[in-house]
Image (cartoon, rainbow, N blue to C red):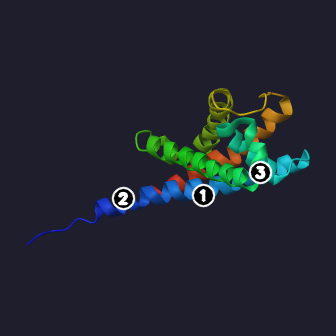
Amino acid sequence: MTTVSHAAPLRSTKVYRAIGWGGFSVGVLDITAAFVTGGLRGISPMRVLQGIASGLLGANSYQGGFATAILGLLLHFVIATGAAAVYYLTSRKLKSLVEQPLACGFLYGIAVFWFMNLLILPLSAFSHKISFTLARVTTGLFVHMFCVGLPIALIVRRFSK
């Protein structure tokens, strides 16, 4: 008689669900925040998405119309899913990420904000000067704490049980 274990497929399903739902949720929340904050400054959603694509294409992204906006949206969700994957994989070693999702989620959001602004954007083809005004940093930290770090932490906790 052979025994079949269902633990490994169930575990891998939880991994994909945690990362997938984390990336999707963060992608929706963060891009919504970007549209709102951009809109308050007179920047259209199309321009926000082209700005994301400019990390790959540089200033040419603004001449690409709808196609580069769609590329920006795709890149945005890839980045969001990557952030969820990093948190999930790290939580396998650091159990406090699952046990303390509020504090760890807020701290992760702060870390993602600084990682993106101090490392990723300067190394990309992003076509704008990165400025650290009090308003930009405050808004960015708030958005990343509540729309990036916290949702990822809560979703990872949900699928880690």
Residue hosting label 3:
33
Image quadrant containing the C terminus? bottom left
**Which SS class for mark 2?**
helix
Tell me the kind of residue under disc 2.
Arg
Please name the amino acid that badge 1 sits on: Phe
User: Which circle's residue, 1 or 2, is located before the other in the chain?
Assistant: 2
Total marks in image: 3
Residue located 80% across and 40% down the image: 139
Query: Between tags 2 and 3, which lies in front?
Result: 3
Q: Report the front residue among 20 and 42.
A: 42
SS at mark 1?
helix
Where does the image place residue 67, in percent across and percent down from the top left?
70, 54
For the view shown, which residue lies furthest in the left direction?
Answer: 1
Left or right, residue 8 beside residue 76: left
Image point (29%, 62%), residue name = 7
Q: Secondary structure at mark 3?
A: helix
Res. 103 in view = yes
Drawn side of residue 138 relative to residue 154, left or right: right
Q: Is residue 125 left or right of residue 91?
A: right
- Tell which of 118 and 111 is nearer to you: 118
* Amino acid at the residue labelled 3: Ala
Q: Is residue 151 above or below residue 91?
A: below
The residue carrying mark 2 is 11
Q: CB of mark 1 within 8 Å of CB of mark 2?
A: no
Q: Position of residue 144 (x, y in %)?
A: 69, 43
Q: Which mark is residue 64?
A: none
Please rate how many residues cluster around mark 2, counting C-alpha atoms within 10 Å: few if below 14, some from 14 to 19, many from 20: few
Reply above or below: 38 against 138.
below
